[in-house]
Structures are given as structure tokens and as C-alpha cells.
Image (spheres, helix red, strand yellow):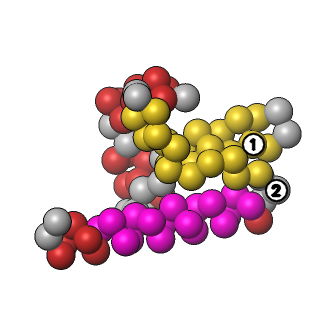
Amino acid sequence: MTEKRRRAERAGRLVESWAAWRLLLTGHRVLARRYRSAAGEIDIIARLGRLLIFAEAKNRPTLDQAAKSVTPDQRRRVERAA
């Protein structure tokens, strides 16, 4: 693994931790992090009351850029894994 890839991996884990912390602070219960199934990986699975949340954490400068970076293929992968 290259140094650039290691830095990206560390940054991604930091963003996932921040996202999980944010969910906890807003009353969510984090059920799993980096959940893996045969269909793929889900970064965070959380619950708020009866609502089940499957989250993909992205490290981007803005929320808009993060939302746009989740491709239709990634959405389908998360749906299959869920």
C-alpha cells in the first residue's frame, strides 16, 4: 500500500469516527461500523427510534461535494449490503 493510500485510509477512518460521534450526539444509536457482507461494506449502521440508517461517510470539502461523490453504483451496493 502506498503512503498516499495510507493517508487516505486514515482520513477516511477519521471521517467515519466523526460521523458516528455526530450521530451519537444527535440521539442515534450506532449499531455497527464498517459492516461487511458478501454484497459490500456499509460505513455506519445506526438507529433512531424505529428508523434504521445506512450511512456512507465521505471526506470532501463540502457536504454538497460529498453527496455528489456517492455514485449510483455505490448506492446500489449499500442497498444490497443492507
The numbered disc on residue 27 is: 2
Pointer 1 with pointer 2, Cβ within 8 A: no
Q: Residue at x 66, y 66 (%)?
A: 21
Toward which corner of the image does residue 46 lie, by quadrant? top right
User: How many dots with numbers?
Assistant: 2
Q: Is residue 81 visible?
A: yes
Residue 9 in the image, given as x and y percentages of width and height: 33, 66
* Label 2 crowd bin: few (<14), some (14–19), many (20+), radius 10 Å: few
Q: Is residue 71 left or right of residue 81?
A: left
Amino acid beneath label 1:
Arg
- Residue 75 makes an appearance in the image: no
- Image quadrant for the N terminus? bottom left
Q: Which residue is more in the foreground, 80 or 36?
A: 36
Q: Residue at x 38, y 71 (%)?
A: 11
Q: Main secondary structure of the magenta part?
A: helix
Compared with 22, 48 (above or below) is above
Q: Which mark is residue 47?
A: 1
Classed neighbour count for the residue bearing mark 1: other residues with Cα under 10 Å, few (<14), some (14–19), many (≥20): some
Q: Which segment is the magenta one? A: 8-24
Say which element carries label 2: loop
**Outermost residue toward the left?**
2
Residue at 67 percent of width and 64 percent of height: 22
User: Does residue 50 appear left or right of residue 58 in this picture?
Assistant: right
Q: Amino acid at mark 2?
A: Gly
In the displayed structure image, the side of residue 27 where residue 36 appears, left or right:
left
Q: Position of residue 26 (x, y in %)?
A: 78, 59
Q: Where's residue 59, x and y in %?
A: 40, 63
Q: Earlier in the sequence, mark 1 or mark 2?
A: 2
Find out whether residue 2 is within the magenta segment.
no
The secondary element bearing badge 1 is classed as strand
